[in-house]
Amino acid sequence: MGISTTRIETETVPGEAIVQERSAKPCALVIFGATGDLAKRKLIPALYNLMKEGHLPEHFELVGIGRSSPDEAAFRQMHHEATAKFSRTKPLDEEVWKKLESKIHYVQGDHESPETFTALNAKLDELDRDRGTQKNRIFFFSTLPSAFPVILSGLKNAGLLHPADPRGPFSRVMIEKPFGRDLTSARELNKMAAGFVSEDQLYRIDHYLGKETVQNILVLRFGNSLFEPLWNRNYVDHVQITASEELGMEGRGRFYDETGALRDIVQNHLLEVLTLAAMEPPVSFKADEIRNEKSQVLRSIRPIYPHEVAENVVRGQYRGYRDEPHVAKDSKTATYVACRFMIDNWRWHGVPFYLRAGKRLKKRLTEVAIHFRAVPLCLFGRDEVCQRLEQNVLVLRIQPDEGIEFSFMCKQPGDDLYVSNVKMDFSYARAFARPAPEAYERLFLDTMRGDQTLFARHDGVEEAWALCTPILEAWEKDGDIPLYQYEPGTEGPEQADDLPRATRNRWRPIG
Ligand code: BG6
């Protein structure tokens, strides 16, 4: 049955913000690994766009630490070119770039060596004195996690990490995933970091939380009286969360072969999305109130024990993966994973949450699909004619083509009672003239404001690992759990269809 689409006309009603955002404080941002790929593709372009939109504080300075640029001029030049290429807004506004560039400094050095930290200390003192950064510092670790302890101790020894004090200047640390490889290493990492900084100084990035559409999950649920009464096991049949990527390794074979889809996407991005879709309303939108509720969801997810892995998790690898550069010829790394989680609480008891993520699939698409319960079979039956109706589905399109769609049943015009599926469609691009900022823009700004809502807390990270570690262990130990091959450009291994089929459902098509 074809689906016809109805466009929703949207009108944004201007009004005063009920809660004013805290303003971003003067500060120096120090990026370790500032000559790397992430800095070029995401970090500096995000700062450029923040500057362009007037969001950076007046007294903002950036210090890059790296090895490969010989001096400040080369460092600035490298980022000029990279920002022109990777910024979400194009072409590069040279005036804005010049203004940002005048705030970019570079310390060439190795984070292993104490001299780097002495030079950094001197640079930060100079910026406090001459540029008004007021001793407020943000340290961003865009390095391998193995470098975290040495950087933290270098900062501490140089006297650059002062304890959290709401009245004094701040030292905040932003760290990139992965936070560990399993539960044990994540606990060790958290313990190590706690030896240097307190939890309210630590900003663990999951860039999915910086996406507008991910943040909108809570607004949709709790800002509309229509949805919340239906958002439970009485009305929801099951939920599908998909993160499908068209791209493959893109030069990251070495990292990916050690990581795989479960560690790379499910443990962090997809479980974060699941918690937002499933959590109870928080008492307020304060960082810890939200993170408490998210943590409750993770703690309510029924663990999948090693002997249940084959039944609840399907893994796959795309054909040709083993020929990618830096990938082992006999690699057993999963580039696709699909799993079924059950949440044992009153709201969700008995409602399966199906998650899937994969590389080299048909299309780039991330979405959350809430499938509502079907109406009684044959409600519209007459004599021998009985039409099975499709479920209502509410789809939150995280990316691309960001938006929300709702499919529902409608009588087809005509003499006969014929029911067909139609779709209402809301698109961010059509409704709002202003394009959505990149995740890192929001995450930088929130760190400058001291707002941890969109950052992972230590307990949440460990709980997510507690769910994924038994699956990883089963895959390692049990040679009988299959790793299915799939063709690039498809929807993944067909064996993954068995998961929703067990409850008479099927995956939504990818593309
Ligand atoms: C990263 C993963 O965290 O997220 C990558 O390491 C993945 O493998 C990326 O490609 C996807 O992010 P986005 O924002 O493009 O969905």
Image (cartoon, helix red, strand yellow):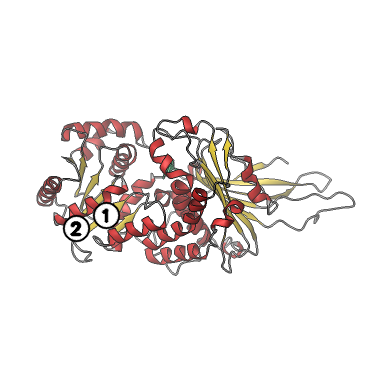
Which mark, residue 321?
none
Q: Nearer the viewer, residue 467 or 350?
A: 467
Looking at the image, residue 236 sits to the left or right of residue 187; the answer is right
Side of 491 where 276 appears, left or right: left
Locate the N terminus by quadrant: top right
Pick the front one: 235 or 467: 467
Mark 2 near mark 1, Cβ–Cβ under 8 Å? yes
User: Element at badge 2?
Assistant: loop
Q: Earlier in the sequence, mark 2 or mark 1?
A: 2
Residue 438 shows in this picture: yes
Q: Quadrant of ligand 1?
A: top left
In percent of width and height, residue 253 lies at 41, 35
Residue type, numbered disc 1: Val
On the rendered structure, is 260 left or right of 187? right
Q: Position of residue 341 (x, y in %)?
A: 56, 57
Which of the pair 426/248 is nearer the observer?
248
User: Which of the two residues, 78 or 501, is positioned nearer the viewer here?
Assistant: 501
Per the rendering, the mark at residue 161 is: 2
| In the image, farthest residue toward the right | 383
Identity of the amino acid at label 2? Answer: Leu
In the rendered image, the vertical position of residue 469 relative to residue 441, given as above or below = below
Q: Report x, y in % for residue 342.
A: 58, 60
Badge 1 is on which residue? 173
Q: Is residue 350 above or below residue 445?
A: below
Please say whether residue 435 is visible from this viewpoint. no
Mark 1 residue element: strand
Q: CA distance from mark 2 to mark 1?
A: 9 Å
Q: Give how far across and how far down residue 390 sits, in percent.
A: 71, 50
